[in-house]
Image: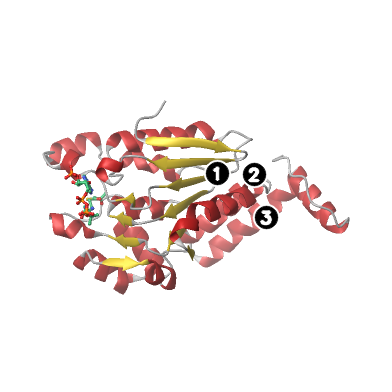
Amino acid sequence: MTDTILVEKLDRVVHITLNRPEALNALNLKVMDEVTATLEQYDSDPSVGCFVISGSPKAFAAGADIKEMQSQSYTDMLKANWFAGWDKLTRTRTPILAAVNGYALGGGCELAMMCDVVYAGDRAKFGQPEIKLGVIPGMGGSQRLTKLVGKSKAMDMVLTGRMMDAEEAERSGLAARVFPADELVGEVLKIAAEIAGFGKLATQTAKEAVNQAEEMGISQGVLFERRTFHALFATADQKEGMAAFAEKRDPDFKGE
Ligand code: CAA
């Protein structure tokens, strides 16, 4: 039972919808706990091959919950290690797709960037407006936005708090693709079903390999890729995928 999110399992895809319409899906601690617990619950389930996180047509999420944070002191923040719970999301091995309609501001933009792929509706607005509140991004925005769009545009966003539209987000590498707003969630669920139809060992390994590009230099990263590529030859899904190609039939991956 969840209060702040809706969870639906559609065949091999788990769809999490942020559901605090009264606060434009502001991310309070309960949302953090419910989203990460749901991811944890299904991550190792072999019948789940992909997650989708979406919000409402008006807001993916308008940030961390300002009203919840407003009266916190430095020591409160430090003791609670505020936002550290979101690190669980980044430890999820199953691919996570963000379907962003409307506002993705502050923690909302950062949540989208923590996911593996960001898909945007054509009226989406991304931004890191924390500077207007006297603070800075706190869920990884200064780091992930900079990796995605480069230093100059990240500085521009973080220092002015301005919003970026979907077209600019796609052009600058924050969003992978843009869809008409009312088709977005359906299109992302289709992409998720396609990913979930592949062997889970391969999709998890692909995710790990791409993520290593953020952490490692090129020669270490390529070595990591090569060794994990070699490792997939220990799986039944590699045999099945290549046999299916040679036999001109659809593969039947078992995640083994
Ligand atoms: N936290 C708490 N409540 C929020 C919220 C947030 N981040 N964003 C919106 N809400 C609430 C509003 O207070 C309002 O509630 P009431 O009806 O009770 O007053 C309700 O959601 C609807 O919002 P608005 O009336 O403001 O809607 P709007 O259409 O006029 O404006 C908006 C939309 C431009 C997104 C505006 O709501 C806004 O600027 N929100 C705050 C955006 C922001 O600063 N985000 C960063 C938060 S800090 C952060 O995220 C830190 C971090 O790095 C993790």
Q: Measured from the top left, where is residue 99 in percent x and y?
A: 45, 53
From the viewer's side, name the closer residue of 202 and 184: 184
Q: Amino acid at mark 2?
A: Lys
Between marks 3 and 2, how big is the CA–CA gap? 14 Å
Q: Which residue is mark 1?
A: 94
Q: Disc 3 marks which amino acid?
A: Phe
Indicate which disc, 3 or 2, sits on the residue closer to the N terminus. Answer: 2
Q: From mark 2 to mark 1, how far is it between C-alphas?
A: 8 Å
| Residue occupied by mark 3 | 229
Secondary structure of the residue carrying tag 1 is loop
- Which label's residue is closer to the chain start, 3 or 1? 1
Taking the spot 44% from the left edge, 69% from the top edge, the residue there is 170
- Is disc 2 surrounded by few (<14), some (14 to 19) or many (20+) residues within 10 Å? many
Residue 223 located left or right of residue 37: right
Residue 130 position, x and y percent, is 20, 56
Q: How many marks?
A: 3
Question: Can residue 187 be seen?
Answer: yes
Residue 117 visible at all: no
Q: Indicate which label's residue lies in the foreground, 3 or 1.
A: 1
Q: Which residue is mark 2?
A: 200
Q: Tell me which residue sits at (54%, 58%) in the image.
A: 210
Q: Measuring 23% from the left and 43% from the top, which residue is drawn there?
A: 65
Give 198 or 140, whichever is nearer the viewer.
198
| Foreground pick, 194 / 101 | 101
Which residue occupies the extreme front position in the image? 182
